Image (tube, rainbow, N blue to C red):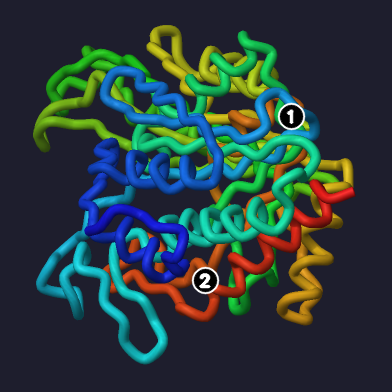
Amino acid sequence: MTHPTLKASTLDIAKNLIARQSVTPIDAGCQAYMAEYLALCGFETEHMDFEDTQNIWSIRGGQASPCLVFAGHTDVVPTGNLDNWLFPPFEPTEKDGLLYGRGAADMKGSLAAMMTATQRFVADFPTHKGSIAFLITSDEEGPFINGTIKVVEELIKRKQTIDFAIVGEPSSTTHVGDVIKIGRRGSLTCWLSIKGIQGHVAYPHLADNAIHKTSGFINALTNIQWDEGNQHFPPTSLQVTSIKAGEASNIVPGETDIEFNLRYSTEQTHEKIMAEVETLVKQHCEQYDIRWKLNGEPFLTESHQLIDAVSESIKQVNGIETSAETSGGTSDGRFIAKTGAQIVELGPINKTIHQVNECVSIEDLNQLSEIYYQTMKKLLVS
């Protein structure tokens, strides 16, 4: 690992970042490296750490509008079984045009492409309009408590505007830029404990089987038709992810613990979902404990300025038409959306993310850098 220079290629930067063992929420020096590089491009960086999470807000152009933010994360998921890797996951390795290493696709490759695109852009257009910023966290792959959500809260307090945000999540399917994300569904998780009365299986009249109560509830819950979705979102879906009950074959269980998650469209609100579920619970049992976690509200970029700039840049660089979608899991875009920014997620192919032998095409990273560069030109050059 070396100090950054403006001569570093996208590949060089990606390798430097991958070599740092930044398993969430550890940053392992990635953000310091990025800040040092961005300082060479005229950026001022503020380290905004909250508890165990490191974050940076790095900006060039102060409060000038429009403000274009590159958003991403330096943390990665654990490696899994090291014996199954072709190469050590934190020793970035090139083979057959691919760069192997944990975080290559999700999302250190994107960060590298953002950095080289920005360096080239400010060198070519030093008096560009507006401002450019980087919002980087080490808490995206973790519990997302002290990362982007906290930084955004602080920026809102300061009245820092964000007009456009490009999130470097790996959005592409078979070619760089064939899919961009213009929004995401909301995510709501519930932990429910349904109470009965524990007893001996030979004396059922002295017990109240919690599993029997639960079966009727789950059947009713999974048969709810929440909505039909809309133009941009599929119908709201619910999946039961865990059911735990019982201690022994001769004991009637007195409690069942259930976990389920809903991915919901803009046709719903989390308040409406919670109320409907709790009404249903009361129909099936008298005693229960319930706990909710709102992982993120749905958001959608409907204004086309950023979408068009990104789509036109993809067509210009790769010659393909992009598909604007809202599918997939959540991203930190859900927190940035609270600023009112237009948001697009654009990153490399997601085929190997979170897998053993995660890798990314080196040429794809170069193309991604070019797409970011052309997008900046369209948004920040008069």
The secondary structure type at the circle numbered 2 is helix
Instruction: Name the mark on residue 225.
Output: none
Indicate the position of residue 304 as horizontal and vertical percent values. Answer: 88, 48
Identified at 10% across, 73% down, the residue is: 83
Does any portion of residue 78 appear in the rendered image?
A: yes
The secondary structure type at the circle numbered 1 is loop
Q: CA distance from mark 1 to mark 2?
A: 37 Å
Front in this rendered view, residue 287 or 330: 330
The answer to whether marks 1 and 2 mark residues whose Cβ atoms lie closer than 8 Å is: no
**Mark closest to the chain's N terminus, 1 or 2:** 1
Give amino acid for label 1.
Gln
Question: Considering the image in quadrants, where does the N terminus appear?
Answer: bottom left
Give amino acid for label 2.
Leu
Identified at 22% across, 25% down, the residue is: 253
Indicate the position of residue 15 as horizontal and vertical percent values. Answer: 32, 65
Looking at the image, residue 95 lies above or below residue 173: below
Classed neighbour count for the residue bearing mark 1: other residues with Cα under 10 Å, few (<14), some (14–19), many (≥20): some
Identified at 20% across, 80% down, the residue is: 86
Residue identifier under label 2:
365
Indicate the position of residue 372 as horizontal and vertical percent values. Answer: 66, 59
Front in this rendered view, residue 6 or 143: 6
Looking at the image, residue 350 lies above or below residue 71: below
Indicate the position of residue 342 as horizontal and vertical percent values. Answer: 77, 39
Residue identifier under label 1:
268
Q: Where is residue 211, by image quadrant?
A: top left
